[in-house]
Image (spheres, grey):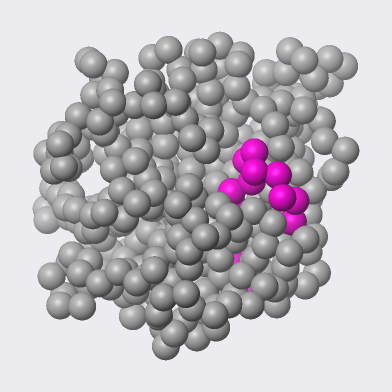
Amino acid sequence: MISCFSKINPPNKVFSPSYDGNLPIDQLVLPDGFKIDVYAEGISNARSMALSSSGTLFVSTRNEGNVYALKDTNGDLKIDQKTTLLTGMTLPNGVALRNGDLYVAEVNRILLIKDIENNIKEDVAYEVINEDYPDKKHHGWKYIAFGPDDKLYVPVGAPCNICESEEEIFATITRMNPDGSNVEIVHEGIRNSVGFDWHPITKQLYFTDNGRDWMGDDEPECELNFAAEDHLHFGYPYCHEGGLLDPKLGEGKSCDDYTPPALKLGPHVAPLGMEFYEGEMFPGEYKNDAFIALHGSWNREKKSGYEIVRVHFEDNKAVRFSSFISGWLEKESDSVWGRPVDVEVMSDGSLLISDDFADAIYRVYYEG
């Protein structure tokens, strides 16, 4: 049994936490000179993150239906104030900031909370700026972010494991104006992207994509994709990992007709959030490389993923990736105590990582 992306409620037998209330971060393996601390605990189902210029961290959930505002009020690099901004939402996975306003993506709606820093309170008022997205929950949770063009990018996952949809909006990345108007499809053939960012120099889009299920433990590989221009097709549901035709829907197709991935990330590792590193804390060779959270397989015979990887760039192109943080997966016992979801660079150059299984957020820093 295999899959590349977890169901909303994966079977309990898949995961067996190995801690009894104290997160075993001493099990995490980082490069020399790097350290990791728990930045926030008890953030149930912590998913996507957006960090304001003043340091307020906005954190979404998926299963819980809540959105939080977290603050470190005394400067000790630990969250000591949590405000539940929204409750009872439908898979509110995506959060994004623009000009002091907070955007939240549910399954079929985009919400806007204006001037959020001055409106941090429970059950905050919001405006619905778009409610025309499909209400299918299968791959319906969304990661959102503003691009260099000041448009809000919103992916729409495939409503299935593998299928051809009659509605063209499925298996795409869309974008809209900040007021929710002028929705357009930017890219097609994308099974389920839950993380993307733009290269700091070229301003071109890179995004993660989760490969299809039920083709065996070792294929297809999940992907990091690169969009050199708008209106590309990345192969789903006909071609996977750039060269593997689908056994059901690939007949008569050619992978040469689709845009191949920039990198293949491994089978069923479930790449989610990603961000380019533009901070000053880490060594210089990390500048303009990217970090990706591998959420991990949920029913592969031998688990894979459950780590943070670093994507190495040369001449502004992705050339390879390497493990940056591992240890959430105990390989000998094949048990899991954490699942990284998203990454966010802080103003001091440290790196935040959300974990929806350990209900925590970590902070990674460099001491040399």
Is residue 136 inside the magenta stretch? Answer: yes
Q: List x then y, in percent, for residue 68.
A: 39, 66
Left or right, residue 328 beside residue 135: left
Q: Quadrant of residue 19?
A: top left
Residue 135 appears anywhere in the view = yes
Work out whether residue 110 or residue 25 is closer to the camera in this orientation and state it. 110
Q: Residue at x 39, y 26 (%)?
A: 12
Above or below: residue 341 compared with residue 127: above
For this view, does 143 lie left or right of residue 242?
Answer: left
Residue 95 is one of the magenta-drawn residues: no
Who's the residue at 49% across and 78% down the image?
124
Q: Is residue 57 above or below residue 21?
A: below
What secondary structure predominates along the stretch shown in magenta? loop
| Count of numbered circles on the image | 0
Place of residue 323 in the rendered image (x, y in percent of width and height, measured from the top left): 32, 34
**Left or right for 366, reference 147:** left
In the rendered image, residue 186, in percent from the top left (x then y), is placed at 75, 54
Q: Height in image: 38 above or below 103?
A: above
| Magenta region, residue range | 133-150
Is 13 on the left-hand or right-hand side of 78? right
Q: Position of residue 84 (x, y in %)?
A: 39, 68
Q: Closest to the observer: 99 or 320?
A: 99
